[in-house]
Each structure stands twice: as C-alpha cells, then as structure tokens.
Image (cartoon, rainbow, N blue to C red):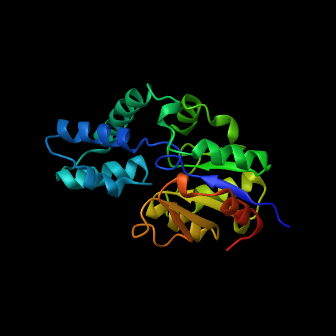
Amino acid sequence: MAQRGFIFDLDGVIVDTAKYHYLAWKKLANELGFEFTQQQNEMFKGVSRKRCLEILLQIGGITASEAQFNTWMVEKNRDYLAYIAHMDATEILPEVPKVLKYLKKMNIPLALGSASKNAVPILEKVHLKEYFDSIIDGNQVTKAKPDPEVFLMAAKQLGLAPQHCVVFEDAVAGIQAANAAGMVSIGIGEKEVLKEAHYVFKDFTEITVPFLDQLMKSTH
C-alpha cells in the first residue's frame, strides 16, 4: 500500500493568526484614511500579501507608485510581526496537537504548505515545528493559491505522488489548490463556504482517529 502524506495550511488550520493579519491591515487602512471590516478581511484568506494589498487599495480607492506599494507591504508585515511576537502554544487551535501526535506516532510524513512568509517563526513560537518533515512557505513559492504550487512542492519534498497526499485547509483558494493538485482536500470551517472540499469539519475536535486511519489507507 502506498505511503500517505498529510499537508497542513497554517493560518486558520493550526493557529488563528488571521486576527493579527486583520489588525495589521486595518491599521494600514485607517492610516490611509478608510475603514477595513472583518467581512472584507474574508477576501484575504489564503491570499498572498501582495494581492491583499492590491485588494485593500482597491477598497480604499487608492493608487500607489511601486515604491509606495512596497513600503506599505513592509509596514504591514512589521505591524503583523509585532502582533505575533507574543504568540505562544495557547494560540494553537483545538485538538491540532492531538492529530499531529497521532499521525507522527503512525509514521506519517507531515508537511506545512502555507502562503505565510512567517510560517517558521510562528511554528517555533507555538512549539510545533518538530512535527513537520517539510515546510513550504511564502519564501519558496512564486504562485499563490489556488495555484497548486505550494502543495506540489510539499509532496515532492515528502517524496510522495500528489494523489497520495491529504491537505487540511480553511480557505476556498486552498481547497481549490489541493483539488487542482489531485490531492484529498479537507476543509476546516463552514460546509457552505468550503463545499468544494472532499470532507469538511468545523474544527479538529470533529476529526476522529478512525477517520484518520481511513485517510491513511485510501485516496478519494
């Protein structure tokens, strides 16, 4: 039987850093003279920082030179890093460590596949870095989800064919990327939002050991 690999997104799957991204984008929007709501922030899930800033400026009706654009990208990231500097293991989403421990015990190869350029420091702060055999983040990928690049790179690093990989994602773009890669997609969030996923769970408290065992044995 072929070995299975499990790939996890970071924001909204392992830890909830979305709130810190929102605070940093909101701060920038306010400095530029307009409001940025949590509802608008939903558009930013699973999207690269560059694309997020493009959307933010569209919302505010603001045009920028390349130099100004790059300055704002750096400014937003600096504010975000200031917010996450105080993160610790209490920020891990419910039951995530239990699932990671079980998969590790079963010798399942694990990878992180995230658009975040801060994935490694975040994993270090919450003491989960040791679980991952491979970490693919925004420093290595050139194409944002829904392009499958991040997950295909993770599969390659794990030495596995894409069809033997399972992806945990909370964003529509991430589910689309996993599906485009030919992987089993598991949505973490709302069923009506993540309807393109093969399976959807509200969070990891709903994921059982028998379900994980089933994933290890079969692809979709």
* Residue 28 figure quarter: top left
* Residue 66 figure quarter: top left
Q: Between 160 and 212, which is closer to the camera in this rendering? A: 212
Quick check: can you spot residue 142?
A: no
Residue 185 x/y as whole percent: 58, 66
Quick check: can you spot residue 36?
A: yes
Q: Is residue 20 left or right of residue 176?
A: left
Q: Between 71 and 171, which is closer to the camera in this rendering? A: 171
* Residue 199 figure quarter: bottom right
Q: Between 185 and 93, which is closer to the camera in this rendering? A: 93
Residue at 68% over, 59% down = 212
Residue at 25% over, 41% down = 26
Residue at 54% over, 64% down = 177
Q: Is residue 76 left or right of residue 110?
A: left
Q: Is residue 147 above or below residue 50?
A: below
Residue 81 x/y as whole percent: 42, 30
- If the image is split into quadrants, where does the N terminus sit? bottom right
Residue 178 x/y as whole percent: 58, 65
